[in-house]
Image: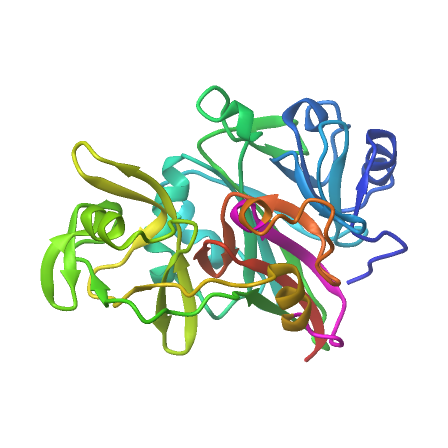
Amino acid sequence: MSNGTATSALLDLRQAGALIERGETLAIAGHIDCLATLPRGNWIGGTTPYFMASEGGTCRLDRVFVQPFGQPAGEIVCYDRERLPHMLEDAPENGFSIVILPAASGVLEDYAREAPNYPDMYIKPIAGWVAGVHLDQLGSAQAQVIDGRSGRCYTDQAIVLHIPLPPEQAAVVHAVNLFTPGAGPTLSFDETGFAARDCLIDGVRGSLLELIRARGIDTRLPLVADYCGAMINVSIQALEPEPGLVSFYAPVFAGVNYRFADAVEDYSERFLQAMPSDGGPILFGCNCILNYLYSQLQGRQTARLTGPITFGEVAYQLLNQTAVYLTLEPS
């Protein structure tokens, strides 16, 4: 894999267009008005106006964040709900895949529920993110992904970039999760889903909404489960008093034990501590919009990690309130 001289950066449209026309293989994030004006080429895109740039977190409607993967490199494939489970069967035996999924779509819901069971999952590296919209446009605009070869936009398909690597190189997917389970009650759910009314609270059935209200739980804190040593977050999307639902940004899984997370003090400093000081070059990175909002990352840097601010992250499975990055290492 050859990266040439291009590096990940927040660019104006002229700079991004020059990289496309130079033949670079790219993943690009930006507002739909920006993405729609870019020339056709070997790139994939997704909508978000929020970014972690080298100078810190920012919202820009006039720039795009570009992540280059070489010249030439990669195969671009669109996946609808029927083809989605086969995405990693199309991935190279040695390489990695970058996926962008539109928020509030059927393909995102399917991926969130079923990805851990897809063929070749956890064998072939996959990282990516969930496209969204400006927060002022929630409910009035749709998240979109773009196939840069044709310029076509999709609200109901995933776009994937499959990148092969030479035998001496390997891709490694990393997730930075600063949250750990707190000391509160253990929660478990009867069904896998994006919303719940009742759950088992320390083994006793009760209302999740009533628990949150009675204990004054800060819903900026996610539910956290320990998956064989890996901490997986499920973030609260909304409290809906009628009919008593609590909705989530990712599904809770039946039979898994969750607890609300402990609060994280000084997210930016903790994040800097969690990022490695060495290791291979970062080819791809993203950070969650909830981290951006709740931890006040506007104008604040997050070590070597730059990239789009996203509405969900992919490190094999769908994650919430994490940062994800992919490095290139010797095999």
Query: In percent of the image, x 42 and y 52: which residue is there?
Result: 86
> Magenta stretch?
275-291
Tell me if I can see residue 190 in this picture.
no
* Picture quadrant of residue 139: top left
Screen quadrant of the C terminus:
bottom right
* Picture quadrant of residue 191: bottom left
The x and y percentages for residue 197 are 17, 46
Question: Position of 121 compared to 298: left or right?
Answer: left
Query: In percent of the image, x 68 and y 22: which residue is there?
Result: 33
The x and y percentages for residue 175 are 55, 65
Tell me if I can see residue 274 in this picture.
yes
Screen quadrant of the N terminus:
bottom right
Question: Position of 24 compared to 51: left or right?
Answer: right
Instruction: In this rendered view, identify the residue nearer to me: 288 or 172.
Output: 288
Whether residue 204 is in magenta: the answer is: no
Question: Position of 273 compared to 72: left or right?
Answer: left
Residue that sits furthest to the right in the current view? 5
The x and y percentages for residue 36 are 68, 24
Vertical relation: 10 (above or below) 182: above
The x and y percentages for residue 307 are 69, 50
Whether residue 289 is in magenta: the answer is: yes
Instruction: In this rendered view, identify the residue nearer to me: 252 or 262.
Output: 262
Query: In percent of the image, x 32 and y 51: which residue is there?
Result: 251
Figure label count: 0
Vertical relation: 54 (above or below) 254: above
